[in-house]
Amino acid sequence: MQTLILILAEFWNTLCEMAPYLLFGFLVAGMLSVLVSPALVAKHLGGRGIWPIFKASLFGVPLPLCSCSVIPVAASLRRHGASKGATTAFLLSTPQTGADSIMVTFSLLGPVFAVFRPLAAFLTGLVGGSIVETFGSSAAQIEPCRDACCCPTRPQSRLMRVLHYGFVVLPGEIGRPLLLGLVVAGAIAAFIPANFFSETIGTGFLAMVVMMVLGIPVYVCATASVPVAAAMMLKGISPGAALVFLMTGPATNAAAIATLWKVLGKRSALIYLGVVVISALGSGLLMDYVFTIGNVLPGPATVWMLPLSVKIISALVLLAVLGVAVFRPRRQHPEAHAQT
């Protein structure tokens, strides 16, 4: 019973820290969903050369598309003339982060992580897209998804569309993995002793390899992975190893790899995986170096201290939003994973 209370206490503390920022991230994601349509993406990211790859990678960083949407949009990009490189860059950068996950990263891991993580996602897409553009193979194309999950019926009002996507559609996609991530974070805090990871796998390159091996086969969405990474850091894992987990988990889901294999070919799919592995390990090493030379410790954002009452109210609102989104009846559509 005492252990359960401890898990619930850690669950609530983490929820209070992230709730104000995540609610704001939901609002930003809703605004982006209205201002930036998949058709606009396909229009501006077509063509060849480094510029479309640059735009595809940059554009994918804040874009609030779930994995179900990323896959058909990427396929549509290719079908409408986008280069292999631009398509790969989009698939690489988009699942690693998003408007909501950036805000959660800021709240739980601090400003350095909040800047470094999307930058790493952008560079991963840029490098991977450039390599695929140069060495990738040609392959058959597929039709983009036209199911309700990717073409939902939305209210006509722009404000209602923002609120509908930000506080209904997006929470419905990440609600379950986010709640699971909070429970896992609480369990780590309750069951794993302090400095467990640093004493068992160390804090250097080996720890990053372990986190990479853990992250590649286990899909976690960009937002839900943050509390898990924060909990592991409290138990002794280095910031760089945590970043490796944050990069490989969301970026290596089976659906994205299978789509890349079919749309761009076997060689491009292998390049995709190789770029994720090398970029994650390289970013992890650089992250540890930044924290070492800066002589700072990662942690929750303290620049703007929010009143406890704001955190509690935000946590209650977030629980209500997630509860409604998770338990409301869903339309039938192919299984998909969430992205932020």
Image (tube, grey):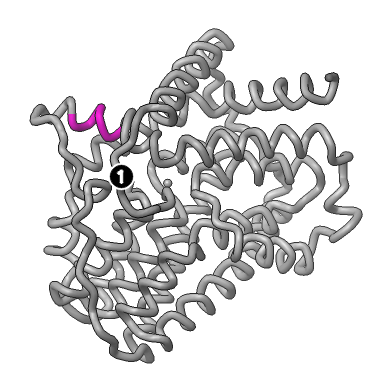
Magenta stretch, overall SS: helix
Q: Position of residue 340 (x, y in %)?
A: 42, 46
Q: Is residue 40 above or below residue 166?
A: below
Q: Is residue 63 above or below residue 312?
A: below
Splitting the image into 4 quarters, where does residue 40 fall? bottom left
Does residue 322 appear to the left or right of 281 in the view shown?
left
Question: In the depicted view, which residue is nearer to us: 183 or 61?
Answer: 183
Q: Which residue is most to the left? A: 156
Instruction: Identify the residue at image location x=40%, y=83%.
Output: 268
Residue 122: x %, y % from top left: 41, 62
**Residue type at numbered disc 1:** Gln
Image: magenta residue range? 161-166
Residue 313 in magenta?
no
Residue 207 lies left or right of residue 70; in this view the side is right
Q: Nearer the viewer, residue 333 or 153?
A: 333
Q: Residue at the top extreme?
A: 309
Give the vertical position of 21 relative to 310 (above or below): below
Residue underneath mark 1: 332
Residue at the image position 54 percent from the left and 51 percent from the top: 220
Q: What's the residue at 38%, 55% (across, down)?
A: 67
Q: Nearer the viewer, residue 151 or 138?
A: 151
Q: Residue at x 47, y 35 (%)?
A: 175
Instruction: Please provide percent x and percent y for residue 30.
Output: 27, 35
Name the quadrant containing residue 28: top left
Q: Position of residue 36 (x, y in %)?
A: 19, 48
Q: Is residue 71 above or below residue 178?
A: below
Q: Secondary structure at mark 1?
A: loop
